[in-house]
Amino acid sequence: MKTQNGLPGSSILDFSQMAAISRFLPPETDDRSATRSAHVAGNVEGFAHMAAVMPLVPQLHAHEALPRNDFARQLQREKRRAERSKSPLSIVVYRISEVPDDAGARPGGEDAGRLLELLHQASRETDVIGHLGDDLIAVLCPDTDEQGVNAYIRKVEELAGGRWFATDAATYPDQIFERLANGGRLPATLHELMAGEFGQRRVQGYRMKRWLDVIGASVLIVLLSPLMLLVALLVATTSRGPVIFKQMRLGKGGVPFAFYKFRSMVTNMDDSIHRQFVADLIKGEIDDKSQQGGAGPVYKIRRDPRVTWVGRIIRKTSIDELPQLFNVLKGDMSLVGPRPPIPYEAEIYQAWHLRRILSATPGITGLWQVQARSTVTFNEMVRLDLRYIRECSLMMDLKILFKTVAVVLRCDGAV
């Protein structure tokens, strides 16, 4: 039995479920309904989400919140769902210990208990409240954009009779993209929630990974220093400009860092060619004919007019990448990991693409380079990076490093 709104009738749903169902009905008095309607209207996944989430989240009383680990698991579920459905996920963090300057009078008694009671009054059935530790409480608001979460914050403040707590809020993945584009950074806790693997027991990598990076990079710098000096001399004497090309790239968590390469192009070049190329690559619109008949997709422009004759040699042999060994020593990069993107590249990522940079330290080489270099689509490359992040181990890194030597000597996929 269904109502004229297309929802199950009261004989199927009990009263406790109606709060969750109301989020999918036309807007009435809740400001957040208006901002959600564009995301959930006609979206069957929204109903599936409601049915799936309700059994997973324990029923909480007015003074209760999910423990940190349970909240972390729910956060990961909601982030993955937001990536699939392309719907916004907002997060609000309340700090009772950091009272803002314009705060009103604080109520007596247990502040955390009082705040939890207010959050339960303001929240929907599908919102998730968690206790992150000390005086820190977070709320997940699925299918809620920036306008909606601001309405939620105002509602809590009205119920509280003032603002006797500090509040931070962000929307996933919208504000991640904005931060990557503007070079800004979210507050520490929000950054961990939005951009990191909050609460994950298994941190990407393994205990010896940093040791392998430092020892491996140091040994390679010593062994390859004569070659690097020769290349530096050739670059300096054959074209004007610095020997080392520095470019802003995004590291783990989207943190920018200076990325080093031997300069292979003329100076003061126009990057609009590359910007357009990257956009077409990510969208899967690379034209093989315009790339001079290469075998499969490529990740560098063929016949790039900006590249010098020395640059063509060092790019073909991957020698231009050797200065990144110093990035490894600095801790910006690892020997093995996903390649670090340029900020304007990350701006046009899909939400799930972000995981390749948010969850792992970037590397000089990786699974994609040794298995399918320049022969797969961008999406397939990202899937290989995510596979590496999931399965990263000492043995895998050693295998990739040895395979990289063979790939470089054969110049597989090099442009």
Image: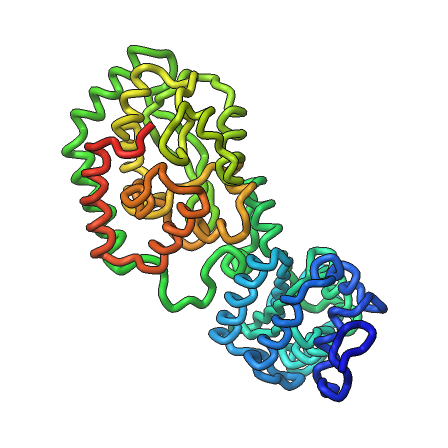
Q: Quadrant of the N terminus?
A: bottom right
Q: Find residue 117 and report its image quarter.
A: bottom right
267 vs 414, nearest the viewer: 414
346 vs 3, nearest the viewer: 3
Residue 267: x and y in percent read: 43, 17
302 vs 274, nearest the viewer: 302
Q: Is residue 355 visible?
A: yes
Farthest residue in the right direction? 28
Q: Is residue 330 visible?
A: no
Give the total number of marks visible in the rendering.
Answer: 0
> As drawn, is 405 to the left or to the right of 331?
left
Q: Quadrant of the C terminus?
A: top left
Name the residue at 85% across, 69% down.
29
Name the residue at 21% across, 44% down.
403
Name the residue at 31% across, 59% down.
391
Residue 258: x and y in percent read: 41, 35
The image's colour scheme reads rainbow
Q: Find residue 101 and report its image quarter.
A: bottom right
Name the residue at 75% across, 75% down.
7
Residue 38: x and y in percent read: 74, 57
Q: Is residue 371 positioned above or below 29 on the image?
A: above
Residue 293: x and y in percent read: 39, 26
